[in-house]
Image: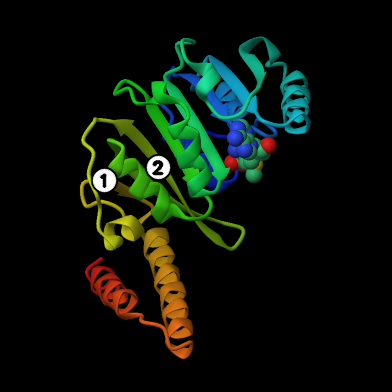
Amino acid sequence: MKSALNARLLSAAELTRQNATFADIGTDHAYLPLFLLDSGHIGYAYCCDINEGPLDSARRNAEERGRSEQMSFILTDGAAALSGKGITDYAICGMGGELIAEIIDRAPHLADSSLNLILQPMTRQEKLREYLASHGFRIVTESYSFDAGKYYVCMSVCYDGNCRDISGLEAIAGSRDSAFRGREYRLAYLKAKLSSLERAASGKLEAGMDCSADTELIEQLKEYISKL
Ligand SMILES: C[S@@+](CC[C@H](N)C(=O)[O-])C[C@H]1O[C@@H](n2cnc3c(N)ncnc32)[C@H](O)[C@@H]1O
């Protein structure tokens, strides 16, 4: 695949299956579906957004690129309205981890083992991992990237119905059963997570609060990182 797409969205493109019927939830400018169409990776895309402004921008970009015939533009909240359209791959990128979890929760048809969910949480990644595990979704691959001074993670996820609780360490570092791409970026990402946990714990300590659970998690994460 080639074309100008930032590294964060490129990792989402790489996790999309060839010839997928694709939906982009929260499409904004439609950069991701346009890239996938231009590169011949997919043949059709549903571009969805909760706001008219981003959807207009998606329509304009599609027209400029001569791709309007291969795209639908849907003003909708989340993914629930897309049931029954034969969509195989859903991208939900560039939002907080809790909002992504909420969007999945409100679209029960996504609990289907034939679907590929491409999720790119900007924040609260641990909340999203907890939600996925406890609702029977498995993270198949985590792909790490670096763009404009920041580290990002993008996940490909499928439903297998195995609901489980995960440890604090797994919520932060991911499952040992997942495949990982972009190992050097993952290491830097985890080190940044460690620093932020340490800052939060020392804040709690200064405020006289109990931070024994935080300290334990910090020690586990240090050990995990040392073995990478
Ligand atoms: C920061 S942009 C991300 C755009 C693109 N997906 C990316 O990763 O670069 C977030 C977009 O999601 C849309 N959005 C937020 N909540 C949404 C929801 N519940 N359903 C659909 N779209 C939503 C916003 O209107 C906005 O266009």
Report whether 26 appears left or right of 19: right
Q: Give the labeled residue for mark 1.
A: 178
Q: Looking at the image, is 47 positioned above or below residue 168?
A: above
Q: Is residue 222 above or below residue 64?
A: below
Residue 200: where, in percent of width, then height?
Answer: 46, 77
Near mark 2 (Cα within 10 A), the count class, few <14, some 14-19 or many ≥20, is many
Estimate the x, y position of residue 221 in percent, counting from the top left: 29, 70
- Give the mark, 1 or 2, whose residue is nearer the N terminus: 2
At 30% from the left and 62% from the top, the residue drawn is: 168
Q: Nearer the viewer, residue 172 or 211?
A: 211
Type of amino acid under label 2: Met
- Tag 1 and tag 2, C-beta contact below 8 Å: yes
- Residue at left offset 41%, top offset 83%: 209
Instruction: Quickly name the residue at label 2.
Output: 155
Which residue is at a point 32% across and 59% down the rendered structure image? 173
Label 1 neighbour load within 10 Å: few <14, some 14-19, many 20+: some
Its colouring scheme is rainbow
Residue 139 seen in render: no
Could you tell me how far apart the alpha carbons at marks 1 and 2 are, in whole angstroms?
10 Å
Q: Quadrant of residue 57?
A: top right
Is residue 162 positioned above or below 185 on the image? Answer: above
Q: Is 26 displayed left or right of 61 in the figure?
A: left
User: Residue 162: in sight, yes or no?
Assistant: yes
Which quadrant of the structure image shows residue 65?
Answer: top right
The one nearer the camera, 201 or 194, is: 201
Q: Quadrant of residue 148?
A: bottom right
What kind of residue is marked 1? Ser
In this image, 167 relative to 87: left or right? left
In the rendered image, residue 147, in percent from the top left (x then y), is placed at 57, 55
Is the C terminus in the top left, top right, bottom left or bottom right quadrant? bottom left
